[in-house]
Image: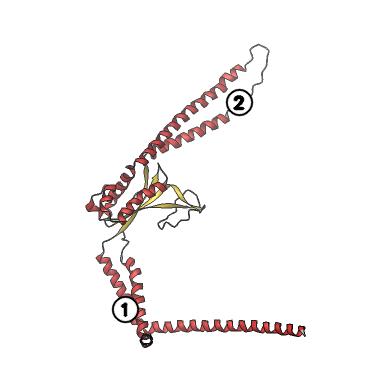
């Protein structure tokens, strides 16, 4: 009797499971048919209403052109700086104060910071500093992180530790020279950066003095090994024979070459990078404005198109909308 009940329960379970799969299959099929029907209706609707939709696109392009004509031209250009006295993080934070002044429209503070007359500040829309990313850690700059979205925990693509990018957004390209000079003066005027740079130069000079002293000492040691020690090993009494072994002077030569290499590196840094920052790439004169017709078209045309589409859908279903409005 119990075996019969178990068999019936198993059979019922199997039937319920199969029925569940059938229901799921029918639901998926209905959903696919509904989606297909909705796509077909949408395509037919778009074909039937192509004239007003096309007019909306034309109106959007016309509005974009009017905005292009009505708004002042805007350009961007980039300046690449090498940070000699401090890390790029401190320099970026310092330069981005100018971005805050631009964002807050603080003309007086921006004019004082970069030493540009207030009448010319209106041509400067923004000044911002960004990290430069080295993809693959090969020491070669690859991209600029304009969106500030780089993952700081990425160990393959890293932020460069000796340079940064400064982007200026202006209305008059001829102001780029004044903007560059103003940014450099703004950085050089910082007392902390000045102090760090003086310490760096003094330490480099101390290293050079010590390296020169060590080179002389090694050179003197080399002469001692060749002459003094060798002479002391000569036989004092006749008839004695001493087998001399040449000293391993190559070790001393390697040390001297390493010191000369360090000396040349420091001398190059003293000559090339003696200031707080060094300009690696100047502002280039932009040719194409960033707020042209295409800039406004990609923003306005979709808005016009979507609004027109919504109005057409509401007009096509106005009776249903009236019923719903009257009901509620």
Circle 1/circle 2 CB separation < 8 Å: no
Disc 1 on helix, strand or loop? helix
Q: Quadrant of residue 170?
A: bottom left
Q: Quadrant of residue 232?
A: top right
Q: Quadrant of residue 233?
A: top right
Q: Residue furthest left?
A: 119
Q: Residue at x 52, y 26 (%)?
A: 218
Counting residues from the start of the chain, the first of labels 1 and 2 encountered is 1
Q: Residue at x 58, y 81 (%)?
A: 24
- Taking depth in this image into account, of 82 and 109 the one nearest to the observer is 109
Q: Residue furthest top?
A: 237
- In this rendering, is residue 186 above or below 4? above
Q: Nearer the viewer, mark 1 or mark 2?
A: 1
- Residue under circle 1? 55
In the rendering, which numbered label is found on residue 194?
none
Q: Which quarter of the rendering shows the C terminus?
A: bottom left
Q: Which quarter of the rendering shows the N terminus?
A: bottom right
- In this rendering, is residue 275 above or below 302? above
Residue 90 appears in view: yes
Give x and y (percent) for residue 284: 33, 53
Q: Residue at x 32, y 77 (%)?
A: 56
Give x and y (percent) for residue 110: 28, 51
Give x and y (percent) for residue 259: 50, 32
- In this rendering, is residue 18 above or below 125? below
Task: Say whether residue 106 is left or right of residue 265.
Answer: left
Specify the color scheme.
secondary structure
Crowding around mark 2 (Cα neighbors within 10 Å: few <14, some 14 to 19, many 20+) is few
- Taking depth in this image into account, of 94 and 219 the one nearest to the observer is 94
Give x and y (percent) for residue 307: 34, 76
In the rendering, which numbered label is found on residue 247?
2
């Amino acid at each position: 009797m119990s075996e019969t009940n178990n068999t019936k329960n198993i059979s019922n379970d199997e039937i319920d499971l199969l029925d569940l799969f059938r229901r799921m299959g029918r639901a998926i099929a209905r959903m696919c048919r509904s989606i297909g029907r909705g796509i077909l209706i949408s395509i037919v609707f778009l074909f039937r209403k192509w004239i007003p939709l096309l007019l909306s696109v034309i109106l959007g392009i016309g509005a974009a052109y009017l905005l292009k004509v009505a708004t002042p031209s805007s350009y961007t250009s980039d300046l690449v700086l090498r940070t000699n006295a401090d890390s790029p993080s401190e320099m970026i934070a310092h330069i981005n104060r100018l971005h805050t002044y631009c964002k807050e429209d603080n003309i007086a503070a921006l004019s004082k910071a970069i030493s540009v007359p207030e009448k010319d500040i209106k041509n400067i829309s923004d000044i911002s500093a960004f990290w430069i990313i080295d993809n693959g850690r090969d020491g070669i700059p690859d991209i600029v992180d304009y969106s500030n979205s780089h993952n700081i925990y990425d160990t393959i693509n890293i932020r460069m530790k000796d340079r940064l990018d400064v982007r200026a957004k202006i209305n008059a390209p001829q102001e780029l020279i004044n903007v560059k000079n103003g940014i450099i003066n703004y950085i050089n005027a910082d007392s902390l950066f000045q102090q760090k740079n003086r310490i760096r130069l003094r330490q480099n000079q101390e290293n050079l003095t010590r390296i020169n002293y060590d080179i002389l000492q090694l050179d003197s040691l080399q002469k001692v090994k060749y002459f003094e020690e060798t002479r002391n090993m000569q036989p004092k009494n006749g008839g004695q024979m001493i087998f001399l072994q040449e000293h391993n002077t190559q070790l001393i030569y390697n040390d001297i070459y390493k010191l000369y290499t360090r000396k040349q590196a420091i001398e190059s840094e003293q000559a090339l990078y003696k200031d707080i920052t060094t300009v690696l790439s100047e502002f280039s004169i932009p040719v194409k404005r960033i707020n042209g017709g295409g800039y406004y078209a990609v923003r306005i045309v979709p808005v016009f198109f979507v609004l027109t589409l919504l109005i057409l859908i509401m007009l096509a279903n106005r009776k249903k909308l009236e019923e719903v409005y009257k009901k509620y």
